[in-house]
Image: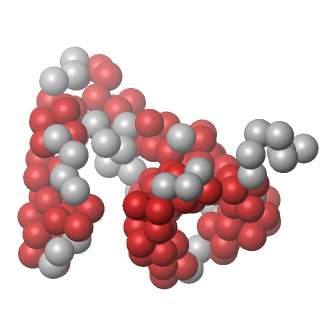
């Protein structure tokens, strides 16, 4: 889902806001965005973002394990995987937005299905999305997000 959303955000960015992120590169980076979790496991968001020190240390650990993954590859393949494991800042921002959007969609679907346990997380995640201030993300929220609250019968 993150890859599909990253691709969509990059397409919207290019077509609607003269963005420079290549949709295929964004989708590919999104496919690999959690690759280091092979080593680290998934760190819960509240822990990861508790303070700048923890986040900084976690980013160092991720970079270290991205390098470890790269080092496992034959030399002639490293050049193809380096930009995937270490995307540029614009692609990284697109993938981060897609990852957060994916979490938000999960919350919306759960709340729409009657699971109130996701209500607070939905509000918190929506705020994170708004704070990103990405025009392509806002466009997605305005034009596509309402469909995620519909049942299959309501989709047309």
For the question of whether residue 18 can be seen, the reply is no
Q: Which residue is at a point 74% across and 61% down the rendered structure image? A: 146
Picture coordinates of residue 83 (x, y %)? 38, 43
Picture coordinates of residue 114 (x, y %)? 56, 55
Say which of 58 and 154 sits in front: 154
Considering only vertical position in the picture, is 85 above or below 80? Answer: below
For the question of whether residue 110 can be seen, the reply is yes
From the viewer's perspective, is 82 left or right of 38? Answer: right
In the image, farthest residue toward the right: 156
Q: Which residue is at a point 13% across and 36% down the rendered structure image? A: 39
Q: Which residue is at a point 28% across and 37% down the rendered structure image? A: 35
Say which of 68 and 46 sits in front: 46
Colour scheme: secondary structure
**In which quadrant of the rendered view does residue 137 lie?**
bottom right
Q: Quadrant of the C terminus?
A: top right
Picture coordinates of residue 135 (x, y %)? 66, 74
Say which of 125 and 30 sits in front: 125
Picture coordinates of residue 151 (x, y %)? 74, 46
Q: Which residue is at a point 47% across and 62% down the rendered structure image? A: 116
**In which quadrant of the rendered view does residue 145 lie?**
bottom right
Q: How many numbered marks appear? A: 0
Considering only vertical position in the picture, is 6 above or below 119? Answer: above
From the viewer's perspective, is 55 left or right of 93? Answer: left
Considering only vertical position in the picture, is 41 above or below 72? Answer: below
């Amino acid at each position: 889902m993150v890859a599909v959303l990253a691709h969509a955000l990059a397409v919207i960015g290019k077509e609607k806001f003269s963005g420079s992120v290549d949709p295929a590169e964004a989708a590919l980076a999104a496919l690999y965005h959690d690759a280091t979790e092979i080593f680290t496991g998934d760190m819960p968001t509240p822990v990861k973002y508790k303070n700048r020190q923890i986040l900084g240390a976690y980013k160092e650990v991720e970079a270290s394990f991205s390098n470890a993954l790269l080092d496992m590859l034959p030399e002639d393949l490293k050049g193809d995987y380096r930009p995937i494991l270490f995307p540029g800042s614009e692609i990284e921002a697109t993938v981060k937005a897609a990852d957060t959007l994916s979490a938000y969609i999960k919350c919306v679907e759960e709340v729409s299905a009657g699971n109130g346990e996701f209500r607070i997380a939905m509000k918190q995640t929506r705020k994170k999305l708004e704070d990103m201030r990405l025009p392509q993300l806002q466009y997605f929220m305005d034009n596509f997000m309402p469909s995620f609250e519909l049942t299959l019968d309501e989709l047309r």
